[in-house]
Structure formats: C-alpha cells, structure tokens
Image (spheres, rainbow, N blue to C red):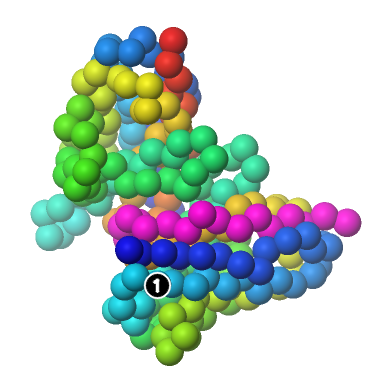
Amino acid sequence: QVQLVESGGGLVKPGGSLRLSCAASGFTFSDYSMSWIRQAPGKGLEWVSYISSSGSPKDYADSVKGRFTISRDNAKNSLYLQMNSLSAEDTAVYYCVRGRWMFVYWGQGILVTVSS
Amino acid sequence: DIVMTQTPLSLSVTPGQPASISCKSSQSLLHSDGKTRLYWYLQRPGQPPHLLIYELSNRLSGVPDRFSGSGSETDFTLKISRVEAEDVGVYYCVQSLQLPVTFGGGTKVEIK
C-alpha cells in the first residue's frame, strides 16, 4: 500500500533553516509528481510546492518562493523540502502528498514550529 | 490566484438528516478538456485530509454514495444525503485548474 512518511520537522528559530524529507513506498515513485501542502495550527490548508516526476518543472506558492526549495531523489524514493529564512508564519504541519492536481495519498504530516 | 469561498463556516446536523456545503470559485474551473477541476476533501480530527469527490462529481472508490458533488463553472455543492457520525470533520473544496492549487476556508461539520 502507498505510504508517505515525513521526517525532519521540529523547533527552529526565526531566520533558521530546516530540511523536510518524505520517504515514499508502495508505488513507483519516479512515475508521480509530488507536492507539499501545509496547515498552520487551527487553520486551513495551503499548497506550498510541487515537483514533476522527473524533477523539473517545479513551482512554489508566492509565500515561500525564494526561501523554499523542493527536490527529489527517485533512486531513494524520497522527496525533500529545504526551508530557509523561516518565520513564525511558516509554523505548520507539512504534508507530503502524491500528485500535482489530485491528492489521493497524504502522509501523516510533520510539525514545523518557528519560534525563539 | 483563484479564490475559493465556502459556506457555511460550520454545520450542526442530526444523524440521518441531509447536509449541504456550498463553494464558489472566483473564476470558472472548467478545463478545456471538458472536466471541471473541483475537488472535495474531508479532514477528520487529527488526520490528514482525504479525497471524497474529484472533478466535480466523481466519488473516489470506497466513498459512500451518500456523498455527492454537483455544480458548474463557479458554483459547487457537496451534499450528504444522510449524515452519519463518521462524517464529522472539516470539508474543503479545492480547485486544481491552475497553480497555485487553492483551498476553500473549510466547513466544519458536527453532529447534534
């Protein structure tokens, strides 16, 4: 069965960096686009970024453009999100999601807290 | 960006009664291929969202037939014919016509 497991979250100070990882299994990872979607505590959902099956193209929400970088390693069945210049507004649960347009499979999410 | 607006913000429903959630988009979600790129997700407490309805009115495999999606271009509705206890959570309408994918603000459904 499809599994998406996020890791790398935690507490980071404003201005700091964090790298999220998502380990995928149960499907041919290299066949699928992947996305990151986040949810601030008690708030709604926000699309963050997507990457095509080959690694290019990719796209970002305006709120993270220039600070976040999405990447993937198809040999390792892994998706990444490098997050730099973090601010309190980036505090959220980050979900690794299979697909670009239709999101059937989601990870359980990983919490990123930006606080001094 | 396409703005998605959901109403109501919350809904309290007696089990066995119907429920309806409205969603409006700031522009048509009709793709040139004839499909409408409107999706409905349910997020149960403490869980990631899961897909219920795709491309306006198609139920994902395993989704009970008490859920139905309808509408056209910019006005959409999710109906639950007879609400059950497991239907509690927050429902989101989502447009996937263009990036950025955008979500409605959510409708919280509770059981009376």
Magenta span: predominant SS is loop
Give the class, few, some or many, for how many residues have Cα within 10 Å of label 1's Cα (few <14, many ≥20): some
State which quadrant residue A13 falls in: bottom right
* Quarter of the picture holding the N terminus of chain A: bottom left
Left-right relation of B84 to A107: left
Can see residue B24?
A: yes
In the image, residue B28 sits, relative to residue B19, either above or below, namely below
Provide residue B59's location: percent of width, then percent of height: 19, 42
Residue at 21% in and 34% down: B64
Q: Which residue is mark 1?
A: A25
Left-right relation of B69 to B25: left
Residue at 37% in and 28% down: B86
Secondary structure state at the residue bearing disc 1: strand
Amino acid on which the number 1 mark rests in the picture: Ser
Q: Residue furthest right?
A: A116
Can see residue B100?
A: no
Task: Say whether residue A104 is magenta.
Answer: yes
Judging from the image, mark 1 belongs to the subunit labelled A
Stretch of the chain drawn in magenta: A100-116
In the image, residue A14 sits, relative to residue B24, either above or below, namely below
Provide residue B81's location: percent of width, then percent of height: 21, 21
Provide residue A113's location: percent of width, then percent of height: 74, 55
State which quadrant residue B25 falls in: top left
Task: Say whether residue A103 is magenta.
Answer: yes
